[in-house]
Image: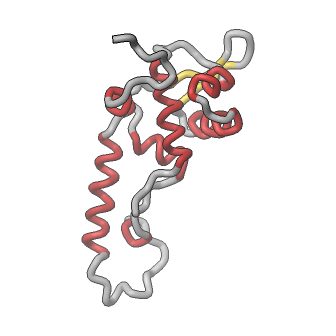
């Protein structure tokens, strides 16, 4: 089964929250409170996103975190890779294989699985944070009274 980790879910929520800040920085504490995530989880995600260049930060009174790229330029693949490492459907689907499979000489699924892997990666690469944000309302904002 293909399943994203809970941390990846949290990462999308956190980056979506930052994207809605419209360029205004937010502290880790503010984000933890707004998203109802544990502070250590937020801190770890922010560190990961900063390390891969999705976020930048500043310390101090007017410090906080902000997106380095626009939500249109941040992909689901960026988020998943930052949180969980490279997306890999099967061991043999990765082009830079360093080890040989014990079943390589009789395997009929390597080529089709590599194709599926590439299609999934392409979908993740083409799905932007903006697109993800547009499909749901912001859970950190009060519900509108309609």
Q: How many marks?
A: 0
Give the left or right position of residue 5, taking residue 123 as reference: right
Residue pictured at 33% horizontal, 27% vertical? 134
On the question of residue 42 being in view, the answer is yes
Pinpoint residue 117: horizontal percent, then vertical percent.
33, 61
On the question of residue 72 being in view, the answer is no
Q: Residue furthest right?
A: 60
Instruction: Quadrant for the C terminus, please.
Output: top left
Pinpoint residue 131: horizontal percent, then vertical percent.
32, 31
Give the left or right position of residue 106, taking residue 62 as reference: left
In this view, the residue in front, 75 or 134, is 134
Q: Is residue 41 above or below residue 139?
A: below
Give the left or right position of residue 8, taking residue 42 as reference: left
Residue pictured at 32% horizontal, 39% vertical? 127
Q: Is residue 90 above or below residue 132?
A: below
Q: Residue furthest front?
A: 146
Pinpoint residue 15: horizontal percent, then vertical percent.
50, 30
Give the image quarter of residue 30.
top right
In this view, the residue in front, 13 or 71, is 13
Q: Is residue 94 above or below residue 127?
A: below
Q: How is the image coloured?
A: secondary structure
In this view, the residue in front, 5 or 80, is 5
Residue pictured at 51% horizontal, 22% vertical? 140
Q: Residue furthest bottom?
A: 106
Pinpoint residue 74: horizontal percent, then vertical percent.
41, 33
Instruction: Quadrant for the N terminus, please.
Output: bottom left
Residue pictured at 44% horizontal, 87% vertical? 102
């Amino acid at each position: 089964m293909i399943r994203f980790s809970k941390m990846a879910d949290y990462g999308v929520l956190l980056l979506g929250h930052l994207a809605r800040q419209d360029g205004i920085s937010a502290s880790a504490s503010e984000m933890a409170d707004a998203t109802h995530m544990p502070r250590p989880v937020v801190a770890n995600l922010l560190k990961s996103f900063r390390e891969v260049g999705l976020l930048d930060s500043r310390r101090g009174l007017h410090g906080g975190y902000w997106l380095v790229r626009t939500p249109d330029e941040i992909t689901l693949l960026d988020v998943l890779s930052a949180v969980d490492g490279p997306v890999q459907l099967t061991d043999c689907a990765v082009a830079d294989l360093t080890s040989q499979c014990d079943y390589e000489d009789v395997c009929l699924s390597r080529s089709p699985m590599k194709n599926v892997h590439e299609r999934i990666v392409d979908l993740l690469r083409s799905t932007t944070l903006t697109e993800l944000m547009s499909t749901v309302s912001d859970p950190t904002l009060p519900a509108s009274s309609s």
